Image (cartoon, rainbow, N blue to C red):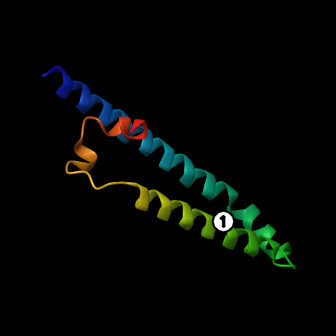
C-alpha cells in the first residue's frame, strides 16, 4: 500500500513539474516574441532559418533514435519502475 501512495505522489509531482515547465516555456515564448520578430526582420542572409532547420533535423534524428532504442513495455507509463529505465 505504501508503494501505491508513493507512486501517486511521484506522479503528482511529475505532473506539477511538467505544468510549471510548460507555463515557463509559454511565458518565455511570449516575452521573446518581439525580439524574434526583430531578429527575423534583420536576418538578410538566412542564417536563422538555416540554424532552425538544422536544429529540427537534429531533434528528429534524436527522437527517432530514442524510439528505435526503446522496447515496448506492457505497462508503459504506468510501470512503477519507469524511472529506472536508463539503468538497463
In the displayed structure image, the side of residue 83 where residue 40 appears, left or right = right
Which residue sits at x=24%, y=41%? 79
In the displayed structure image, the side of residue 46 where residue 23 appears, left or right = left
- Quadrant showing the C terminus: top left
Q: Which residue was labeled with disc 1? A: 55
Q: Secondary structure at mark 1?
A: helix
Q: Position of residue 32 (x, y in %)?
A: 69, 57
Q: Position of residue 50 (x, y in %)?
A: 75, 74
Q: Which is more toward the observer, 38 or 51?
A: 51
Which residue sits at x=58%, y=51%? 27
Which residue sits at x=36%, y=33%? 13
Residue 58, placed above or below residue 43: above
Which residue extends farthest left? 1
Q: Position of residue 29 (x, y in %)?
A: 61, 57
Total marks in image = 1
Quarter occupied by residue 67 = bottom left
Quarter occupied by residue 49 = bottom right
Residue 85, placed above or below residue 51: above
Which residue sits at x=32%, y=54%? 71
Q: Position of residue 70 (x, y in %)?
A: 38, 54
| Mark 1 Cα-neighbour bin, 10 Å: few <14, some 14–19, many ≥20 | few
In the displayed structure image, the side of residue 41 where residue 22 appears, left or right = left
Residue 41, placed above or below residue 76: below
Which residue extends farthest top? 2
- Quadrant showing the N terminus: top left
Amino acid at each position: 500500500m505504501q508503494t501505491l501512495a508513493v507512486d501517486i505522489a511521484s506522479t503528482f509531482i511529475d505532473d506539477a513539474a511538467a505544468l510549471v515547465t510548460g507555463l515557463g516555456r509559454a511565458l518565455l515564448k511570449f516575452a521573446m516574441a518581439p525580439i524574434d520578430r526583430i531578429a527575423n526582420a534583420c536576418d538578410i542572409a538566412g542564417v536563422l532559418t538555416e540554424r532552425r532547420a538544422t536544429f529540427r533535423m537534429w531533434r528528429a534524428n534524436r527522437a527517432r533514435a530514442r524510439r528505435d532504442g526503446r522496447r515496448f513495455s506492457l505497462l508503459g507509463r504506468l510501470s512503477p519502475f519507469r524511472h529506472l529505465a536508463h539503468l538497463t
